[in-house]
Amino acid sequence: MRTSLIYNPTAGNGKAAALYSQLRPQMESFGVEVFQTQGPRHAIELARTFADDPNRTVISLGGDGTHHEVINGLMPSGKAIFSVIPAGTGNDFVRVLDYPNDPEAILQTALHGTPRPIDVGQAGNEYFLTVSGIGFDAEVAAWVNHRAKAGSGRSVFLRGILYNLLFYRSQAVSVMMDDRAAETRDSFLLAGGNTAYYASGMQICPGASIHDGTLTVVWIERLSRLEVLPMLLRVLQGRHLGHVRVRSAEVRKLTVDGPQELQVHADGEIIGHLPITLRALPNAIRVRMGKPN
């Protein structure tokens, strides 16, 4: 089994570079090939060269944005085994992999963890691991990516939330879930989750699973400014389902249409604008998993 590591030195505002330096001796002892990204989307090109090799593990060292690029290089073939070493701002994908906390133990799991097939989401022509969203969360993701490079963790997302509260307005979007009739509603945000988490641990899609072949859709309808912060506190704790302004469903396919200026994110990366179709791709790739606590 060959192992290649795709490493983004800019991830996590220096966190990835420090972690790579710490783990480099162990990687060398295991014969890991290291490929450093040179800029945006380069990880896709690097990963694409390994996508058809079922005897190779491809490790992504960086944040969820780096993992997003690597999975877009490995898909749609999905023959290589995927694993991650988290070193970014949010680190949401690793939350569902039962990884340990110690960096050296994380490396051992990334190298030798049990490969299990997981679902992958698709948004238009892009693949995603965690959540794809439209509306307020996409505006926050754009702000975080372009204006908030200093800092990491949940605080940077909270700053983006507070900034966008001043300007964002709910807009009407049309949503068709699987083969049901389309519905149009004024919407604060709509998220399709392959996992529960985004924005550094916010549980936007509680109950979402990488093993059930569906996306968990959470559709939050129009909120007043005074309603937004209480709703976001509920989201932080995963307690928003059942709220009168929140709808949820499990779907295999979701089509969203509306104002073309509305951005779409996937794994926190802006990938385009409406309209968009989201899909769940069951058992799309093998990922090295840790042992449940």
Image (spheres, helix red, strand yellow):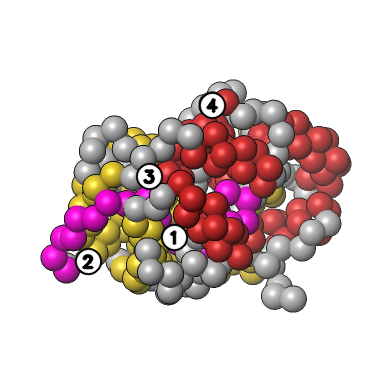
Amino acid type at image mark 3: Gly
Label 4 Cα crowd, 10 Å radius (few <14 / some 14-19 / many 20+): few
Q: Which residue is found at the position 16% from the left and 60% from the top?
A: 182
Real-space Cα separation, disc 2 to disc 1, in angstroms = 15 Å
Mark number, residue 178: 2
- Residue closer to the observer: 146 or 186: 186
Highlighted magenta segment, given as a residue range: 180-202
Can residue 51 be seen here? The reply is no
Amino acid type at image mark 1: Gly
User: Left or right: where does residue 173 sit relative to residue 158?
Assistant: left
The image quarter containing residue 152 is top right
Q: Which residue is mark 1?
A: 193
Asked if the residue at tag 3 contacts the one at tag 2, i.e. Cβ–Cβ closer than 8 Å, the answer is no
Q: Which residue is found at the position 58% from the left and 58% from the top?
A: 233
Mark number, residue 8: none
Q: Which residue is mark 3?
A: 135
Q: Which residue is mark 4?
A: 146
Asked if the residue at tag 1 contacts the one at tag 2, i.e. Cβ–Cβ closer than 8 Å, the answer is no
Label 2: state its secondary structure: loop
Q: Where is residue 129? Give x, y as percent.
A: 49, 54
Q: In this rendering, which labeled residue sits more in front, label 4 or label 3?
A: 3
Q: Where is residue 221? Give x, y as percent.
A: 34, 57
